[in-house]
Amino acid sequence: MSILLKNTTFIDWQSLAFTPCNIYVEEGLNGKVKLLPLGEIPDQTNLQQIDCSGKYVTKSFAIGHHHVYSALARGMPAPKKSPADFREILQYIWWNLDKCLDKEMIKYSALATAIASTKAGSTFVIDHHASPSFIKGSLETIAKAFEKVGVSHLLCYEITDRDGIKKADDGLAETDEYLQKKQGLVGLHASFTVGNETLKKAAVLMEKHHTGIHVHVAEDKYDQLHSHETYGKSVVERFSQAGLLESPASILVHGLHLSDSDRKIIADSPAWMVQNPESNLNNNVGFFNSAGLGNNIMLGTDGMHSDMLQSAKAAFFSGQQYDTIDYEGVYRRFRNVHHYLSKNQFQGDGSNNLVVIDYDTPTDFNADNFLGHFLFGIRAEHVKHVISNGKLILKDRIIQTVDESEILDYARSVSKKLWHCMQQG
């Protein structure tokens, strides 16, 4: 069913031009969007009309790096041992959590993530998943949950040697099988948990499916230290020599502890870097600095939440001391995910993905001062309607495709099972 958004103001996400109009939205992956004069209504019987008087419409958002598996972690009990450093945070919290995940937990983690992403205005999620006890079928489980809510996706499984070669091969097999059916990436955890043989196999898989790698890079100093001691080269040098940076679909995540030569390698490649400021602050691993990295930088949430507006604000504020970033720069990083998806011809982020913002402000709001409102005014609570691939999936802040209350209620019971398992680990 086509949609007509009436009596609204369209904000072009690239030029930031404000246009009072009616907006005709066609359903489907490649559905069209037409800006019509105010008052003009298409002569069409099957048309859903929504009055957007006083509201603003713009392209919906997308998440450059997420972790579905962390959705049921909120409020979980403290680990048995208080982590002393980043490696222990992984060992006692996240690697303990992901080992406990079963199919049901993954399904409800994905449903909860898709719901939260939608309510915060995102209709596309790039996810990096791990579940060593349930590898085969894990990506399809996430995909089905996302599609049930109406959120498009680019998934990968986090291949790693940390649980043994058999699990690494299972991750490779799951990736290979999934990529034969759907768009996605080849996931790797980080250099210090991926040996040379697994790295070679991942590179072959990347080339076979004409896609990219999605991998954590130099999130902590240990990643670089391990690479130098074990392989005699930096993480970026190792990945570059393996051919992982040759694809414009490759995503490098974090990139906090990089040398000048690392930064030049990345800048000279077509690969993309994803900044995750809140996660870095939470793990106390350092601050992102864009110096020398080029322009292929986008934002993610790293599983901390599903709110890209919040991530943009965090990137800007932390960047005042540790990075060189201005209003235009943070908005560019916020929107760069669309360029990444478009350049690599990934489906699901077309022009008929829109968000309706119910934003009443005591000051003027226009193209000249949009960026100030973007940083200091607009929040997820202002998201009123969301259209994904031409389909209304959020109306009046209520999810239209699934029963949110029923899903979250059941997710709470599933989370208790997860937490119990973690306490036994």
Image (cartoon, rainbow, N blue to C red):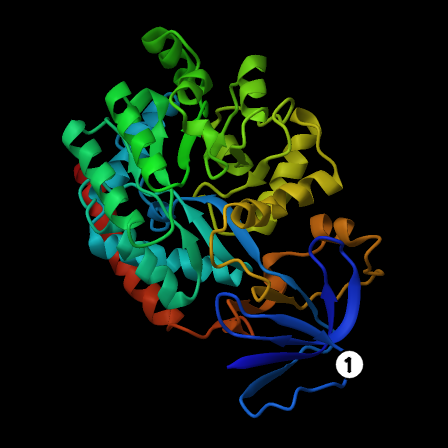
Give percent across and percent down for residue 110. Answer: 35, 56
Circle 1 sits in a helix, a strand or a loop, which is it?
loop
Q: Which residue is mark 1?
A: 38
| Image position of 7 with respect to 128: above or below | below
Amino acid type of the residue tagged 1 in the rendering: Leu
Is residue 187 in view from this perspective? no
Asked whether, in this view, residue 103 is left or right of residue 229, the answer is: left
Task: Identify the residue at image location x=56%, y=41%.
Answer: 299
Give percent across and percent down for residue 230. Answer: 32, 9
Task: Identify the residue at image location x=27%, y=56%.
Answer: 141
The quarter of the picture where residue 43 lies is bottom right
Asked whether, in this view, residue 245 is left or right of residue 58, the answer is: left
Q: Which quadrant does the C terminus fall into?
A: top left
Asked whether, in this view, residue 399 is left or right of residue 310, the answer is: left
The quarter of the picture where residue 225 lies is top left
Task: Identify the residue at image location x=79%, y=63%.
Answer: 18
| Image position of 323 with respect to 403: above or below | above
Give percent across and percent down for residue 187. Answer: 35, 37
